[in-house]
Image (cartoon, rainbow, N blue to C red):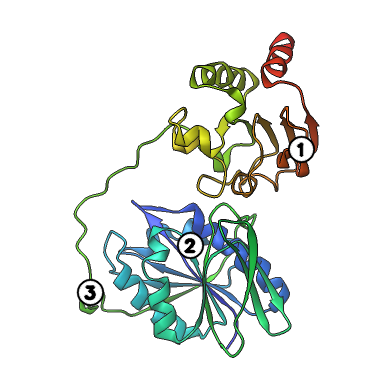
Amino acid sequence: MSGILVVAEHLRGAVSDISRELIGAACRLREQTGGPVRVLLVADDPAALLAPLQLAGVDEILTVAGAGAHFDPAVTEAAAHLAALHCEPEVILLGHTSCGMSYAAALAVRLGSGFGADIFDLEPGPQGLRATRGGYGAKVNIVLEFPGKPVVVLTLRGATFKPPEGGGTPALVALALDAAAVPGRSEHLAFTEAPSAGVDIGKAEYILSIGRGIQEDKNVARFAQLAERLGFTLGCSRPVADSGWLHKAHQVGLTGKVAANCKLYVALGISGAVQHLHGMKHVETIIAVNTDAHAPIFNVASHGSTLDVFEFADAIEKLL
């Protein structure tokens, strides 16, 4: 048994970003453990979705055709089980998404494998694979090990692992599965688009985030205008989103979005609760402005100031 199997996701005719991130995680792990990286694509017409998955580091793409135009957890679980029997991987990676979570545990039970969810770090350990996830509301990191398990199923957190750069020429292997005969299939009725705020924190390179330090909702417009003039995406902490001052899509943190591609993060009036730090502490350059000199945000900031956020905004606006 060797190698890593990635189960790709697609939605409404397009491969999801998480699929490429899973491949990035697999390739990084393969550098330490060896073995081939294989990707499983379950679709009605896999050929139409192959291109985004033909990345550097992928050795093989396994396809299951005729699975229907829409995701079905029972069919995907059956296909993943078939692929696991075919290539006998040591690790199977799925997205920690509504799709991945709908069948990941069932697949692990079916294979008798180890299992971990919402994983954000992977590394080899003395007893095999070690996977890290958060615990107690992200206040601690929990390291999982799987002694005695020949295969491990993991769901990985989105916007955490970088996709490989460049394309590849993986071999294509078709697997036969009678999707119509899979028990427990669901019927797709409709797709309802989630409300959009026109912002994607996960892809933003420059983010200006606001917290309770802006005092009241009427001040949001001023900082939104400042972010726009600077060419930044407007983010926020959970209290701002929970109060309805900004749409949930702006929230950075454990229950919001990870600033995965951010190069410069400006935190205004944000204390730095561990849940918020989860979404931005990895950013290379962090500027924090908070009147509380002991605020936790300063523990991760590259530069900090105890200036009042409104005085800070005044100073920046004079320079624009």
Q: Is residue 225 above or below residue 92?
A: above
Pick the quarter of the image with the C terminus. Answer: top right
Provide the residue designation for mark 2.
Answer: 95
Residue located at (26% from left, 64% from top): 68
Is residue 202 or residue 133 the one in the foreground? 133
Q: Looking at the picture, which amino acid does disc 1 mark?
A: His
Spot occupied by residue 96 in the image (x, y as percentages of width and height) = 48, 61
Q: Secondary structure at mark 1?
A: loop
Tell me the CA gap for discs 3 and 1: 55 Å
Mark 1 near mark 2, Cβ–Cβ under 8 Å?
Answer: no
* Of pointers 2 and 3, the one earlier in the residue sequence: 2
Q: Secondary structure at mark 2?
A: strand
Spot occupied by residue 280 in the image (x, y as percentages of width and height) = 65, 44
Residue located at (76% from left, 39% from top): 298
Circle 1 packing at 10 Å, graded few (<14), some (14-19), many (20+), is few
Circle 2 packing at 10 Å, graded few (<14), some (14-19), many (20+), is many
Provide the residue designation for mark 1.
Answer: 294
Q: Nearer the viewer, mark 3 or mark 1?
A: 1
Judge from the rendering whether residue 304 lies leftward or rightward of residue 217; answer left or right. right
Spot occupied by residue 234 in the image (x, y as percentages of width and height) = 56, 29
Q: Is residue 79 above or below residue 155?
A: below
Q: Is residue 47 above or below residue 197?
A: below
Q: Looking at the picture, which amino acid does disc 2 mark?
A: Gly
Q: Which mark is residue 184?
A: 3
Q: Secondary structure at mark 3?
A: loop
Spot occupied by residue 43 in the image (x, y as percentages of width and height) = 34, 64
Q: Nearer the viewer, mark 1 or mark 2?
A: 1
Residue located at (70% from left, 38% from top): 263
Residue located at (38% from left, 64% from top): 46
